[in-house]
Image: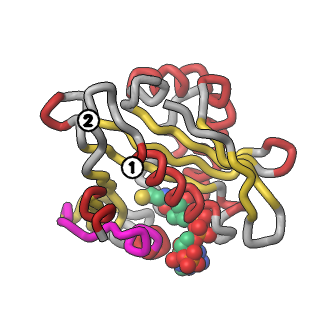
Amino acid sequence: MYFHPLQVPLRDGRSAVIREATREDSAALFELERAIVRARQGIVKHEDELPPDAATFAAQRERAGLMKTDGSAFPLLVEGEGGVLLGEASVLRIGYRMLRHVGVLGIGVHPSAQGLGVGRLLMRHLLQWVRSHRDGDGGRVLRVELYVRADNSRAIALYRSMGFTHEGSRRAFLRADDGTLVDDLLMGLLLAEADAS
Ligand SMILES: CC(C)(COP(=O)(O)OP(=O)(O)OC[C@H]1O[C@@H](n2cnc3c(N)ncnc32)[C@H](O)[C@@H]1OP(=O)(O)O)[C@@H](O)C(=O)NCCC(=O)NCCS
């Protein structure tokens, strides 16, 4: 299970590197998450609900299984010039054997790097990586799913363009900053179907 680092072009003419995230990236990933949460776009938590420090954040990633190297987790990140972290995305497979073909996707791009193609690059390479992975017994990820706020039109447009379809809604799932209740969408992609098309 290894993702070969790749040099990729951004829309502003600069280049970046897309590579697997490791334990050593935890502190930078924590800073990225804080910047995204502070920007209050597309997120479901407040800054004071984040882990108190990078070590706790790293422990949470570890507990969630994101650092496993047995084919359960596919963590990617994009680094800009000088090693600055521009975005990250991951697919984490569900542990139960009956659900092991299901991966849950998460993605976040730094507010200062949004709109440059980082999100699309992450989605494309992450899905390729997941699609090409085979377990020792031939098992693979067949379904990728994600949750997205119904008012996050930018993310929804990106997911639809990658083949995800709207499968259901959690009505009035979250309360936005202005007090209104917002639905949350479940979107899914069947990799076997996408492979066949
Ligand atoms: C949603 C997000 C991941 C998209 O990443 P990004 O790097 O900003 O997006 P990209 O530049 O790769 O653009 C991808 C697509 O998003 C959409 N998009 C990007 N910028 C947009 C804008 N300003 N307005 C509307 N749609 C936009 C377009 O469909 C675009 O397609 P294109 O490549 O054909 O232009 C990123 O904006 C983000 O992290 N936002 C905050 C956190 C979040 O919403 N996470 C997802 C939670 S489910």
Q: Is residue 156 above or below residue 96?
A: below
Magenta span contains residue 166:
yes
* Circle 1 residues within 10 Å: few <14, some 14–19, many ≥20: some
* Amino acid type, mark 1: Arg
What residue would you read off at disc 1? 131
x 68%, y 35%: residue: 28
Q: Is residue 99 above or below residue 41?
A: above
- Quadrant of the image where one finds ligand 1: bottom right
Q: Quadrant of the C terminus?
A: bottom left
The picture quadrant where one finds residue 83 is: top right
Residue 68: percent from the left, percent from the top?
A: 44, 23
x 26%, y 51%: residue: 143
The picture quadrant where one finds residue 116 is: bottom right
Residue 44: percent from the left, percent from the top?
A: 41, 53
Q: SS class of the residue under badge 2?
A: loop
* Circle 2 residues within 10 Å: few <14, some 14–19, many ≥20: few
What residue would you read off at disc 2? 139
Q: Please give the range of residues in magenta.
A: 158-170
The picture quadrant where one finds residue 72 is: top left
* Amino acid type, mark 2: Gly
Q: Which of the two residues, 42 or 92, is positioned nearer the viewer here?
A: 92
Q: SS class of the residue under badge 1?
A: helix
